C-alpha cells in the first residue's frame, strides 16, 4: 500500500482587469463586477502528515519567501495560526468531510501579502486542494468551489485560474476568454492595505454608488486579444480609495505611464500597482522604471493568463 506523505499545490496570483463596486449591502459586503485574471506569480502550499493527536485541522503552519528575498518583510507578516485563511481552509475541509489526520502546512510565497493580488485567498484555495488530495476526501470541483466561496470572496477564482468574471460579492464565476498572452509589471509596496479599510474609504468617497455594470469593451478586447484596447479599458472603482489611503501610489502609477505602459492602475484594494506592457521586454523596462518610484519596494513581471491550482 502506498501512503501519501506530501502534496504540493501551485497557485497563481490575480489582478483585477475591471473592479466595479456597488453600494454597501445589508451584510456589509458590496456587489461587484470583478474581472479576475490569473498571472504567473505563484505560491506553493505543501501539506504533510504530523505525528500528534488528531485535531481535524492543521497543527502547524510555516511560511518562507520564495521570491529570492524581495518579499522577506511581507512573509514576516504572514499569520501562522488559525487566523490564516489557509489554516481555516484545512479546518473547514476537515469539518465537512470528517478527516482527522493532523497535518502541517508550509507556504512558499511569491505573491505579496495584503497586496491586492489575493495571496491569502490563493493560499486558502491551494490548501483546500492539497488537503483534499492528502486526506483522499475526493471533493469534486463544485464541492471545492462551494467551500472556497464560504472562506472568502476571492478564494474560488484561484481554483479556476484563467480569466473569469466574478459577480455577487465576487465569488460567482463565469470563465471568460483572453485570446492573447498579456505581459504585466507589478510594483509592490513595503506595507499592505487592509481590504475592509479600502472598501470603507470607497463608501465615504462614493455615497452615490450604483449597481456595478460589466464593461463590454473590455470583454471584447480580451476576446480579440487586443492588448492596447485591454489597456484602455482597465478600471478599478477602488483606486481612488486606495490612493486616498496611500497618496504616494500616484507617483508609482505615473512612473509606469511614463515608461509607456498600456494601462496603469491599482490592483484590487492595493497597494500593489499593475502595469500592462506591450511585450515581455517592455514589461521588464516598465518594472525597472517603477522601481525608482518612492513607494516601490520591489517590482516583478509576470504574464497572464495561467491555469489555476495545480497539484505538482
Ligand atoms: O470576502 P473577504 O473576506 O475576502 O472580504 C474581506 C473584506 O473585504 C470584507 O470584510 C469586506 O469588508 C470587504 N469586501 C466587500 N465586498 C466584497 C468583498 C469584500 O466589502 N464583495
Image (tube, rainbow, N blue to C red):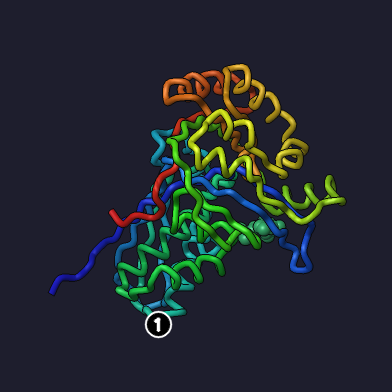
Residue that mark 1 sits on:
98
Q: Which residue is at a point 58% across and 46% down the rendered structure image?
A: 114
Q: Is residue 257 left or right of residue 7?
A: right
Q: Nearer the viewer, residue 107 or 53?
A: 107
Residue for point 56% across, 69% down = 150
In this view of the protein, which residue sits in the foreground, 191 or 178? 178
Q: Residues within 10 Å of mark 1 (few under 14, many from 20)?
A: few
- Viewer-nearest residue: 64 or 139: 139
Residue 258 percent coordinates (x, y)? 62, 17
Q: Residue furthest right?
A: 207
Q: Is mark 1 within 8 Å of ligand 1?
A: no
Identify the residue at image location x=51%, y=29%. 299
Q: Quadrant of residue 233?
A: top right
The percent position of residue 311, horizontal first and vertical second, equals: 31, 57
Q: Residue at x 58, y 26 (%)?
A: 262
Establish if 230 lies above or below 143.
Answer: above
Instruction: Please tell me how many numbered marks the rendered image carries.
Output: 1
Amino acid at each position: 500500500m502506498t501512503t501519501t506523505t506530501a502534496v504540493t499545490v501551485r497557485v497563481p496570483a490575480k489582478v483585477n482587469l475591471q473592479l466595479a463596486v456597488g453600494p454597501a449591502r445589508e451584510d456589509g459586503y458590496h456587489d461587484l463586477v470583478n474581472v479576475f485574471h490569473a498571472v504567473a506569480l505563484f505560491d506553493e502550499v505543501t501539506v504533510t502528515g504530523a505525528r500528534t493527536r488528531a485535531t481535524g485541522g492543521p497543527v502547524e503552519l510555516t511560511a518562507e519567501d520564495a521570491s529570492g528575498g524581495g518579499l522577506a518583510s511581507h512573509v514576516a507578516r504572514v499569520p501562522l495560526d488559525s487566523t490564516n485563511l489557509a489554516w481555516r481552509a484545512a479546518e473547514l475541509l476537515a469539518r465537512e468531510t470528517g478527516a482527522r489526520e493532523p497535518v502541517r502546512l508550509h507556504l512558499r510565497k511569491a505573491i505579496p501579502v495584503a497586496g491586492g493580488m489575493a495571496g491569502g485567498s490563493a493560499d486558502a484555495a491551494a490548501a483546500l486542494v492539497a488537503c483534499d488530495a492528502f486526506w483522499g476526501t475526493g471533493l469534486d470541483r463544485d464541492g471545492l468551489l462551494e467551500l472556497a466561496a464560504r472562506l472568502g470572496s476571492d478564494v474560488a477564482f484561484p481554483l479556476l485560474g484563467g480569466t473569469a468574471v466574478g459577480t455577487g460579492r465576487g465569488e460567482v464565476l463565469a470563465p471568460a476568454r483572453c485570446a492573447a498572452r498579456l505581459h504585466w509589471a507589478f510594483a509592490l509596496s513595503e506595507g499592505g492595505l487592509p481590504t475592509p479599510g479600502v472598501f470603507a474609504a470607497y463608501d465615504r468617497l462614493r455615497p452615490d454608488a450604483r449597481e456595478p455594470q460589466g464593461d463590454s469593451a473590455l470583454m471584447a478586447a480580451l476576446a480579440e486579444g487586443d492588448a492596447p484596447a485591454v489597456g484602455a479599458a482597465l478600471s478599478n472603482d477602488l483606486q481612488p480609495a486606495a490612493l486616498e489611503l496611500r497618496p504616494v501610489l500616484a507617483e508609482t502609477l505615473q512612473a509606469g505611464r511614463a515608461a509607456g505602459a498600456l494601462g496603469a492602475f491599482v490592483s484590487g484594494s492595493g497597494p500593489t500597482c499593475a502595469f500592462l506592457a506591450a511585450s515581455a521586454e517592455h514589461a521588464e523596462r516598465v518594472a525597472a522604471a517603477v522601481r525608482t518610484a518612492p513607494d516601490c519596494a520591489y517590482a516583478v513581471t509576470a504574464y497572464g493568463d495561467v491555469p489555476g491550482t495545480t497539484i505538482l
